[in-house]
């Protein structure tokens, strides 16, 4: 019987989870580092506990501090959000060992899926298609080269203990192996502490298609259809949408079945996402298992809009032991949703992450617009964490309608004080290739300079307004905002708000 | 009223003269600025077109949002004819927001081009700021632990 949930995260996802917990009648406990003492997620919860200084390693990644916070606040459940410790088996295990409910899959499932080669082997055995590839015990150059000849170029050399696109080498000519293999080993060792490599066929211009699944503790699993996440910059997602314009009903059914098989193979529970690479078109498109993300994903809201569900609410119910809230035949996709991730980064300067005060932060609102944000006007964007400010989710009856809603909403999003990728997002979703649905995972990188150039128009009107504003003495302070955060929390003020 | 501003945006510089009743002449183009909500203005351009602009910040750092674009301006209201707040080569400023982790030089030190001056840390990367010219350190304007951003002067160097 869950009563009080500690949200082991920050920013927009912490706010999102807190709201769902409250709607479900649960008490909420937020945690914060000194950099987040005045952050929105702290004020959204019923109680808040300081967990350490700003660096993530000393706060949001500090398992002991988080468990202490749970103990002191009387929490009986922990939601890990995404990122941070959400996919670390040792954290899930520590939460379970402390007698708390971990709102996510069992620690065993997280562990088994953490090894990319282990997961591939499991899936192959279960009959889920995987990217053709070869894993080898014999890691010598000779053995790897022979395997490359057998697999055929083009191929990718990948770290077995890796993830996130790090340390991958593209091989188009077998001759390149002599230099690329040692390089790959060095990078794998440095990034993951493990130089083991495996080879995978390179899918040219693939689409990244992922399937949302939810499993309860009674053996039932459903899929909530696919999301298309091919708009990526250097393997980081920028825009996501659902349904995928490239997936036909026949392929959708096969993807859903494969995702459920994948989840069942590892005894999965709670929410997860099965990622695939898709190549080809129409009913003949081929897909290959890539990995399973054992957590709620950043882009989950687009599924919520199109399927008409609340995934966090469902996570809470499943974690409390309830059966799945829906049967597979009750789930439908209706309409179309697009999500734009708004980052504090400067596209004109190589997407350098930004930090600074949010002098102005005004969200667009209206029919079909949902904003999940973790910042407010008057707050500060710090250097310590991922620079995601907000997610703009636009819903429409059709794909074209949802893109139109997104474009209009982006022009009304006012964020001043730090550079953001707002203009970049507008350029991207205005592209012919995007509106016609022909984006692959390399598209943004290939057209980077055009997309990040910014407007050619001279900012005369903006200059005039800025000069006038300055002549008035700078204008009124940002409306309704708190002052800039005071540095350093009171070390004795560890719990604020109600304590039961 | 009646102020002149040198307005810098990336590599471009504009001259804006504010007059009475919301008139602002930007590089010779006469615009009219009217209030349009808190910190928001409706600017009528010479061709009659109206553009809504939201503005925040205080000179020299003024931000504006207009028609989906965001602008970071540097405004200099000093006497007519003087150049803007472009930093001279003798003022070293960081390329990105970061934390100072080490100050290598002290006031009075003689340095050569390329010498390390300050070490910064951001997003788990270390960045060494090196002198772009030889000279003598006039002043160190930062300390270990300071949070700095583009525009913050770290060190001043005299030739």
Image (spheres, coloured by chain):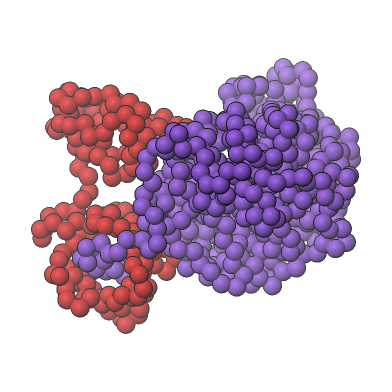
Chain colours: A purple, B red
Please give the count of numbered marks on the rendered protein: 0
Image quadrant containing the N terminus of chain B: bottom left
Q: Nearer the viewer, residue A135 or A400?
A: A400
Above or below, comparing residue A499 to residue B56 in the picture: above
**Residue drawn at 59 percent across, 35 percent down:** A72
Q: Is residue A110 left or right of residue A392?
A: right
**Residue drawn at 10 percent across, 58 percent down:** B79
Image quadrant containing the C terminus of chain B: top left
Q: Residue furthest bottom?
A: B48
**Residue A278 x %, y %:** 75, 50
Q: Residue furthest front?
A: A500
Q: Nearer the viewer, residue A76 or A149?
A: A76
Residue A245 appears in the figure: no
Above or below, comparing residue A84 to residue B119 in the picture: below
**Residue A336 x %, y %:** 69, 66
Q: Is residue A291 left or right of residue A390?
A: right
**Residue drawn at 27 percent across, 75 percent down:** B33
**Residue drawn at 72 percent across, 36 percent down:** A100
Name the quadrant containing residue A90: top right
Name the quadrant containing residue A8: top right
Residue B41 appears in the figure: yes
Above or below, comparing residue A447 to residue A164 in the picture: below
**Residue A137 x %, y %:** 78, 19
**Residue A207 x %, y %:** 70, 51
Q: Is residue B22 left or right of residue A433?
A: left
């Amino acid at each position: 019987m869950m009563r009080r949930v500690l949200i082991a995260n920050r920013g927009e996802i912490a706010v999102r989870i807190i709201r769902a917990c409250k709607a479900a009648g649960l008490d909420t406990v937020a945690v914060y580092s000194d950099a987040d003492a005045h952050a929105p997620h702290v004020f959204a919860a019923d109680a808040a506990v300081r967990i350490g200084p700003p660096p993530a390693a000393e706060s949001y990644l500090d398992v002991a501090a988080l468990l202490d916070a749970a103990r002191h606040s009387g929490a009986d459940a922990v939601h890990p959000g995404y990122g941070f410790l959400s996919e670390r088996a040792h954290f899930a295990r520590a939460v379970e060992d402390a007698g708390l409910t971990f709102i996510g899959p069992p620690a065993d499932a997280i562990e088994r899926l953490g090894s990319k080669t282990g997961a591939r082997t499991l899936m192959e055995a279960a009959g889920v298609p995987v990217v053709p590839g070869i894993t080898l015990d014999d890691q010598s150059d000779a053995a790897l080269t022979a395997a490359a000849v057998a697999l055929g170029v083009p191929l990718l050399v990948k770290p077995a203990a890796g993830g996130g696109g790090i340390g991958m080498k593209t091989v188009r000519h077998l001759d390149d192996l002599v230099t690329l293999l040692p390089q790959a080993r060095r990078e794998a060792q440095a990034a993951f502490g493990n130089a083991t490599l495996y080879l995978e066929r390179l899918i040219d211009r693939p689409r990244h298609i992922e399937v949302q699944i939810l499993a309860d503790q009674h053996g039932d699993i459903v899929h909530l259809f696919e999301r298309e996440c091919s708009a990526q910059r250097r393997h980081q997602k920028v825009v996501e949408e659902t349904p995928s314009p490239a997936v036909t009903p026949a392929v959708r059914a096969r993807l859903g079945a494969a995702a459920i098989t994948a989840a069942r193979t590892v005894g999965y529970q709670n929410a997860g996402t099965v990622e695939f690479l898709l190549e080809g078109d129409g009913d003949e498109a081929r897909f290959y298992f890539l990995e399973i993300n054992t957590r709620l994903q950043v882009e989950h809201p687009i599924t919520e809009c199109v399927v008409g569900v609340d995934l966090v609410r469902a996570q809470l119910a499943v974690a409390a032991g309830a059966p799945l809230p829906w049967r597979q035949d009750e789930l439908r996709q209706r309409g179309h949703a697009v999500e734009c991730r708004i980052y504090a980064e400067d596209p004109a300067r190589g997407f350098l992450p930004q930090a600074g005060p949010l002098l102005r932060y005004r969200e667009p609102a209206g029919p079909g617009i949902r904003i999940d944000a973790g910042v407010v006007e008057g707050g500060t964007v710090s250097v310590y964490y991922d620079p995601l400010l907000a997610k703009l989710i636009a819903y429409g009856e059709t794909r074209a309608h949802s893109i139109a809603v997104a474009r209009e909403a982006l022009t009304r999003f006012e964020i001043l004080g730090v550079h953001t990728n707002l203009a970049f997002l507008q350029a991207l979703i205005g592209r012919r290739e995007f509106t016609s649905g022909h984006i692959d995972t390399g598209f943004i990188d290939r057209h980077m300079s055009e997309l990040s150039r910014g407007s050619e128009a001279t900012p005369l009107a903006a200059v005039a307004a800025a000069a006038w504003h300055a002549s008035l003495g700078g204008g009124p302070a940002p409306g309704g905002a708190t002052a800039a955060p005071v540095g350093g929390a009171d070390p004795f003020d560890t719990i604020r708000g109600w304590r039961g | 009223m009646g102020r002149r501003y040198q307005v810098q945006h990336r590599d471009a510089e504009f001259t804006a003269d504010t007059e009475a009743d919301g008139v602002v002449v930007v590089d010779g183009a006469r615009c009219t600025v009217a209030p349009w909500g808190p910190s928001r203005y409706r600017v009528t351009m010479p061709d009659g077109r109206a553009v809504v602009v939201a503005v925040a910040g205080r000179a020299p750092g003024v931000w504006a949002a207009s028609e989906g674009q965001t602008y970071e301006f540097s405004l200099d209201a000093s006497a007519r004819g003087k150049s803007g707040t472009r930093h001279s080569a003798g003022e070293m400023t960081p390329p990105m927001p970061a934390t100072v982790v080490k100050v290598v030089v002290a006031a009075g030190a003689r340095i050569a081009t390329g010498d390390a001056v300050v070490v910064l840390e951001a997003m788990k990367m270390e960045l060494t700021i090196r002198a772009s010219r030889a000279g003598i350190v006039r002043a160190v304007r930062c300390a270990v632990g300071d949070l700095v951003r583009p525009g913050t002067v770290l060190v001043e160097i005299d030739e």
